[in-house]
């Protein structure tokens, strides 16, 4: 009985803590590294931004990136940041698995520090997709894979409001 009450108390405490990165939050400046050096993720007022955290060995992540690659024309006009915490990612040209994504100037690949990402975005579960409007405000986030139709629906969302 004491264990049960302790568990209930812990769950209530967890639910009462404020969310680390709630909807409406402004995209944080986050340092990431690519083949050309260190860069900073920033608000881009000219387009919506989608931030994706993935891991090379995650089947769900690979599926999600394949969906983005296959439907790339429908993602035109969106700034896409694809991040991983795998420090060796660029050494094996891993992004070449998704040629339409890797060949686009609107897609930015990068390696991020796991703790910095978690502190800024609240999670390092993969895949993790965050959607920002042109003002840099978070309007939706997804943990886990989603069908491309849902992703496209979410990207069109702010056009209607």
Image (tube, rainbow, N blue to C red):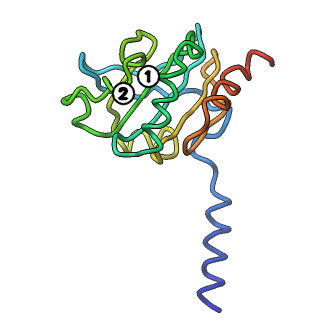
Q: Which mark is residue 59?
A: none
Pointer 1: residues within 10 angstroms few (<14), some, or many (20+)? some
In the picture of the structure, the residue carrying the numbered disc 2 is 31
Mark 2–mark 1 Cα distance, whole angstroms, equals 6 Å
Residue 2 placement: quadrant: bottom right
Q: Identify the secondary structure beneath mark 1.
A: strand
Front one among 70 and 158:
70
Residue 53: x and y, percent?
45, 36
In the picture of the structure, the residue carrying the numbered disc 1 is 41
Q: Is residue 113 left or right of residue 66?
A: left
Up-down: is 96 above or below 141?
Answer: above
Q: Is residue 61 left or right of residue 45?
A: left
Discs 2, 1 touching: Cβ within 8 Å: yes
Q: Is residue 159 left or right of residue 63?
A: right
Q: Identify the secondary structure beneath mark 2.
A: strand
Q: Of the residues under marks 2 and 1, which one precedes in the sequence?
A: 2
Pointer 2: residues within 10 angstroms few (<14), some, or many (20+)? some
Quarter in which the N terminus is drawn: bottom right
Residue at the front extreme of this rendering: 70
Up-down: is 81 above or below 63?
Answer: above
Residue at x 60%, y 21% (from the top left corner): 136
Residue at x 45%, y 25% (from the top left corner): 29
Residue at the left extreme of this rendering: 91
Quarter in which the C terminus is drawn: top right
Residue 123: x and y, percent?
50, 46
Up-down: is 126 above or below 75?
Answer: below
Front one among 63 and 161:
63
Residue at x 36%, y 36% (from the top left corner): 84
Residue 94 placement: quadrant: top left
Residue 14: x and y, percent?
61, 63
């Amino acid at each position: 009985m004491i264990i049960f009450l302790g568990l209930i108390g812990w769950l209530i405490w967890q639910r009462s803590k404020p969310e680390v990165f709630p909807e409406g939050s402004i995209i944080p400046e986050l340092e990431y590294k690519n083949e050309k050096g260190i860069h900073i993720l920033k608000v881009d007022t000219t387009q919506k931004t989608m931030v994706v955290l993935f891991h090379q060995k995650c089947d769900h992540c690979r599926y999600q990136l394949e969906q983005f690659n296959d439907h790339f024309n429908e993602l035109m006009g969106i700034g896409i940041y694809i991040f991983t915490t795998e420090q060796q990612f660029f050494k094996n040209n891993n992004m070449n698995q998704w040629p339409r994504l890797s060949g686009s100037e609107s897609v930015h690949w990068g390696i991020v520090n796991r703790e910095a990402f978690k502190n800024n975005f609240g999670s390092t579960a993969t895949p993790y997709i965050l959607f920002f409007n042109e003002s840099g405000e978070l309007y939706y986030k997804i943990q886990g894979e989603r069908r491309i139709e849902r992703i496209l629906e979410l990207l069109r969302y702010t056009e209607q409001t």
